[in-house]
């Protein structure tokens, strides 16, 4: 049996996160005029608002994971991206940063404390807990966008077939577009 590496799951989740965001943004790019910002029933009132929320929260947490102090400046502008193209580009950048954080992780860094700069206080969390929270947040809100797409002209994409080796037949084009390989994803 191979040695257990506690960092592997977080690396895989970071890649999974980026792949799912890529696939979701590709679907949203096909929306008819007005559908991206159309009012819908969900926690946030539109696909645009929900995807922007994912982005600004990622800016906050990834900055903290990198040792930064961006804090609430991350969401000073609630919806910084007005188009799916701009949003997809910004999300890809922060997803790459998150992948890099997870690629650099060690058992020691996973057990280290990350300081998040809140308005009036510093929130201190273990890195492994913060990563778990961030991946849950992403999954939660991507699911909302997925549901909103069901009420649009675009079929919601498959978002849950990235993490296991057997699903490689479903992700080849996305890996190529992102410049990744199965070897990197499965290591």
Image (cartoon, helix red, strand yellow):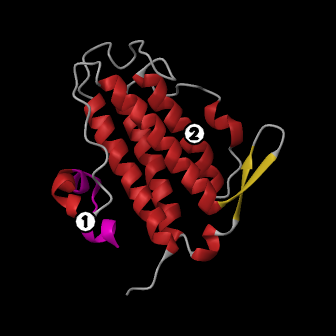
Residue 157 in picture, x, y percent from top left: 25, 37
Q: Position of residue 68 (x, y in %)?
A: 68, 53
What is the secondary structure assignment of the residue under circle 1?
A: helix
- Magenta span contains residue 183: yes
| Side (left or right) of 31 relative to 6 | left
Above or below, 147 relative to 117: above
Question: Pointer 1 and pointer 2: residues touching (CB < 8 Å)?
Answer: no
- For the residues labelled 1 and 2, the Cα–Cα distance comes to 30 Å
Q: Where does the magenta region start and end?
A: 174-187
Q: Main secondary structure of the magenta part?
A: helix
Callout in the foreground (1, 2): 1
Give the quarter of the image for residue 179.
bottom left
Asked if residue 129 lies left or right of residue 86, the reply is right
Q: Position of residue 100 (x, y in %)?
A: 48, 62
Say which quadrant the C terminus sits in: bottom left
Q: Is residue 82 visible?
A: no
Query: Left of 73 or right of it: where is 19?
Result: left
Which mark, residue 165?
1
Give the residue at x 51% y 23%.
43
Mark 2: which secondary structure? helix
Say if 86 sits above or below 174 in the image.
above
Residue 114 x %, y %? 70, 59
Q: Which residue is mark 2?
A: 57
């Amino acid at each position: 049996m191979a040695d257990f590496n506690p960092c592997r799951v977080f690396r895989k989740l970071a890649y999974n996160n980026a792949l799912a965001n890529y696939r979701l943004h590709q679907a949203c790019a096909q929306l008819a005029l007005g559908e991206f910002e159309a009012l819908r029933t969900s926690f946030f009132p539109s696909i645009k608002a929900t995807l922007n929320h994912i982005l600004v929260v990622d800016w906050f947490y990834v900055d903290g994971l990198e040792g930064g102090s961006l804090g609430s400046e991350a969401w000073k502008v609630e919806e910084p991206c007005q188009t799916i193209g701009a949003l997809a580009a910004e999300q890809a950048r922060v997803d790459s940063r998150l992948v890099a954080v997870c690629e650099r992780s060690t058992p020691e860094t996973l057990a280290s404390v990350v300081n998040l700069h809140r308005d009036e206080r510093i929130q201190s969390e273990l890195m492994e807990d913060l990563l778990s929270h961030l991946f849950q947040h992403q999954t939660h809100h991507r699911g909302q966008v997925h549901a909103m797409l069901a009420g649009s002209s675009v079929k919601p994409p498959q978002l849950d077939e990235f993490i296991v080796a057997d699903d490689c037949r479903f992700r080849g084009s996305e890996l190529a577009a992102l410049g990744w390989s199965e070897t990197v994803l499965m290591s």
